[in-house]
Image (cartoon, rainbow, N blue to C red):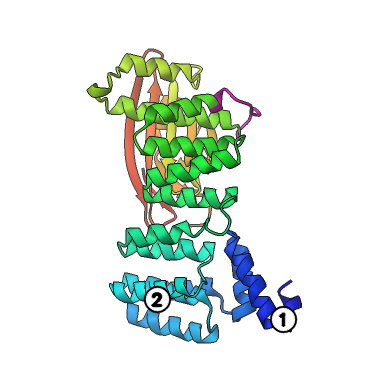
Amino acid sequence: MLAHFASSPEAQHFLASHLLRRTVDIRIAAVVSRVLYGSVDWSLVDRELVDLGKPDKQLTRLKQAMLQAKGDPQGEVRLVRVYARSGQRQEALSVGRRLRDRGFLTPTLAQQLGDVLVEAGEQEDALRTYSEIVEFDGASSKSRSVLGDIYYRQGWHAAAYRQYKTLTDLDHKNPLAWLRLANAAAGAGRIDEALRIERDVAGGEGTPGPSDPRLFARLLSASRLAVMLDKLDPATGATPEAIGRKLKELSLFSGPGTLALLVWSDLDASLVLGAADEKKESLEGEATDAGAVGLYAVLGSTKPWERASHAVRYRSEILARKVAYRVITLAWDGKSFKVSVTPGELAPGAKQSGP
């Protein structure tokens, strides 16, 4: 479509700008960038910048690429990132604000620039920048979901809750939207509200199977109750017996066994819990991939779990930022529950990490 308007640059740029302002699909953004500004492969440039290491060499290589694609905001976003990582915050903010003032801040670029501002410690500017993701299409459930996910991974749970609440208003029957809302409520400390939302989803409509949102809801509730059991707060009045009863009500165990729950907040990442040696067979037990809400679970016998060596790894594209997670093990011996919670982190660019 853009090629059709190549003979009329003004019309082409007008169409491209409206496409970019309303899409959160990085593939569309990449195509528009290539058609308008040249054939620079920015993903290749990114890899070269990592290999160069030193900021001065990165700046030289980046400016060479920017000369090949004059005016491409993709280059300026990377310039902001290099400035920020080298400690030149004022230069980074100056380029970022100039990019925003030029009106080139598409949803995709807003996300990238916001990430850079967070790294630079400029939270207020980052919040304003991220918010432009929904500015031109506030009724888009996809845009609301993307913005809520960004806020959630940054730990800004109140802001994430507002986006997810709007998302449930726009898409009331989407159970995954409600489970995202529960995640944000729990992050903000409202565990009772999160459990109530998950109970509603678990009792709603669904199709039995590995992608059943009703199962996702019960597993999320199990993770929250397990953390409560691990660190009992006397002020809440909760007791091991009361929490144990709620765990039994979830009907996740048919007998003694161990439920291993991997949970994380960066929903751009798709993680799995498996054997430490990737070449060996996967862990014994029934696995559930609820990556859409930041959870992966394995339910099996206790002894094989205790004997095996475990690791957390990507099953999706490896992210160039750190991803924090927790491995929660909930063991049931037929009489009582035993819990352990192990935090961990996947380093930027790392494929796997031990729990």
Q: Is residue 205 magenta?
A: yes
* C-alpha gap between disc 1 and disc 2: 29 Å
Residue placed farthest to the left in the image?
Answer: 234
Residue 294 vs 256, above or below: the answer is below
Specify start and end residues of the magenta stretch as a single range. Answer: 201-211
Q: Residue at x 43, y 32 (%)?
A: 260
Q: Residue at x 60, y 51 (%)?
A: 140
The C terminus sits in image quarter: top left
Q: Residues within 10 Å of mark 2 (few under 14, many from 20)?
A: some
Q: Residues within 10 Å of mark 1 (few under 14, many from 20)?
A: some
Q: Position of residue 207 (x, y in %)?
A: 66, 29
- Dominant SS of magenta comes to loop
- Residue 256 visible, this orientation: no
Q: Earlier in the sequence, mark 1 or mark 2?
A: 1
Q: Residue at x 30, y 62 (%)?
A: 121
Residue 346 horizontal side relative to residue 148, left or right: left
| Labelled pair 1, 2 in contact (Cβ < 8 Å) | no
- The disc placed on residue 95 is 2
- The residue to which callout 1 is attached is 6
Q: Residue at x 53, y 55 (%)?
A: 134
Q: Position of residue 256 (x, y in %)?
A: 44, 18
Three-letter residue code for mark 1:
Ala
